């Protein structure tokens, strides 16, 4: 839904700029228009324009076949005039659609309802989250040696940082999977820390990297990042200091997944 609204806003802005650009060009363009006549051995180009005043005003044609600059100016004028006409025709219906369009996504519907329903909406959101968390999915096998930190929703994770991230996602009612399996090229299976489901059924991957002082750890995670299918958007990496130690994460953005 957001994509449609953003696309409408972008197109309206673009066409307003085109209107301004075309009007400025037409204000300085040569008068008249281009006429093209087919000949046996090619084409002849004429500059057609009105000449004279009042009753003496007449249409004139000047052969400009050898004047390429004027031919191009008159051609550009014709194109700009057509673009201008189309923009004026498009502008009103586009603005009307933007003003009248009502998103049908449940999230937007809930926001438009009375505040007295907010508690019910929160219950609905909690149920959806619990359903999401309890839905079966292929994940990294449990290892009691490494999965030692329990989250608020009862899942054992590898680190306190993952515990904090999991608790935060759960507290905000954001649907996610922990260490979900992703089958990649060459029979490689990856288990990123969190797969976060977005309201439009796209998702992001959040990989928390907390040992950047370890060269082997960095190398392994760099290879892991490059192992994701190349058809996915490029990873976004962000480095932040944390008490003398750097941390990072990489995310897949708005990818329509079959792993749902």
Image (tube, rainbow, N blue to C red):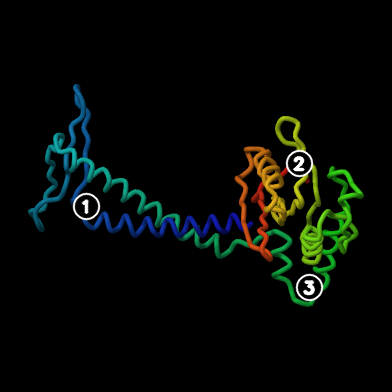
Q: Earlier in the sequence, mark 3 or mark 2?
A: 3
**Image quadrant in which you'd find residue 13:** bottom left
Seen as rendered, the residue at the extreme bottom is 116
Which residue matches tag 2?
A: 190
Q: Residues within 10 Å of mark 1 (few under 14, many from 20)?
A: some
In the rendered image, residue 64, in percent from the top left (x then y), is placed at 14, 38
Looking at the rendered structure, the secondary structure element under dot 1 is: loop
Q: CA distance from mark 1 to mark 3?
A: 59 Å
In the rendered image, residue 240, in percent from the top left (x then y), is placed at 63, 61
Let me know if residue 203 appears in the view: no
Q: Which mark is residue 118?
A: 3
Q: Earlier in the sequence, mark 1 or mark 3?
A: 1
Left or right: where 16 falls relative to 26: right
Residue at x-position 47% and y-position 58%: 12
Left or right: where 220 falls relative to 31: right
Q: Nearer the viewer, residue 140 or 214?
A: 214
Left or right: where 146 falls relative to 211: right
Residue at x-position 67% and y-position 60%: 245
Q: Nearer the viewer, residue 25 or 189?
A: 189
Let me know if residue 234 appears in the view: yes
Seen as rendered, the residue at the extreme top is 40
Q: Nearer the viewer, residue 74 or 148?
A: 148
Q: Which mark is residue 130?
A: none
Which residue matches tag 1?
A: 29
Residue at x-position 69% and y-position 70%: 112
In the rendered image, residue 165, in percent from the top left (x then y), is placed at 77, 61
């Amino acid at each position: 839904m957001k994509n449609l609204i953003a696309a409408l806003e972008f197109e309206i802005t673009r066409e307003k700029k085109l209107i301004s650009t075309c009007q400025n060009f037409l204000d300085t363009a040569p008068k008249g228009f281009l006429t093209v006549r087919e000949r046996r051995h090619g084409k002849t180009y004429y500059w057609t324009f009105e000449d004279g005043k009042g009753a003496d005003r007449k249409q004139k044609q000047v052969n400009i076949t050898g004047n390429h600059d004027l031919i191009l100016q008159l051609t550009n004028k014709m194109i700009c005039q057509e673009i201008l006409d189309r923009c004026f025709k498009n502008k009103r219906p586009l603005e009307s659609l933007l003003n009248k369009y009502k998103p049908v996504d449940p999230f937007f519907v809930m926001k438009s309802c009375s505040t007295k329903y907010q508690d019910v909406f929160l219950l609905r959101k909690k149920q959806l989250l619990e359903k999401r968390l309890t839905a079966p999915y292929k994940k990294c096998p449990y290892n009691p040696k490494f999965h030692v930190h329990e989250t608020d929703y009862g899942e054992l994770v590898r680190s306190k940082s993952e515990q904090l991230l999991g608790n935060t996602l759960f507290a905000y009612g954001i649907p996610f999977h922990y260490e979900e399996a992703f089958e990649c090229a060459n029979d490689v299976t990856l288990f990123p820390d969190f797969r976060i489901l977005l309201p439009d059924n796209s998702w992001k991957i959040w990989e928390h990297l907390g040992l950047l002082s370890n060269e082997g750890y960095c190398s392994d995670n760099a290879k892991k990042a490059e192992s994701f299918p190349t058809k996915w958007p490029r990873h976004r990496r962000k480095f932040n200091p944390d008490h003398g130690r750097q941390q990072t994460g990489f995310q897949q953005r708005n990818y329509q997944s079959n792993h749902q």
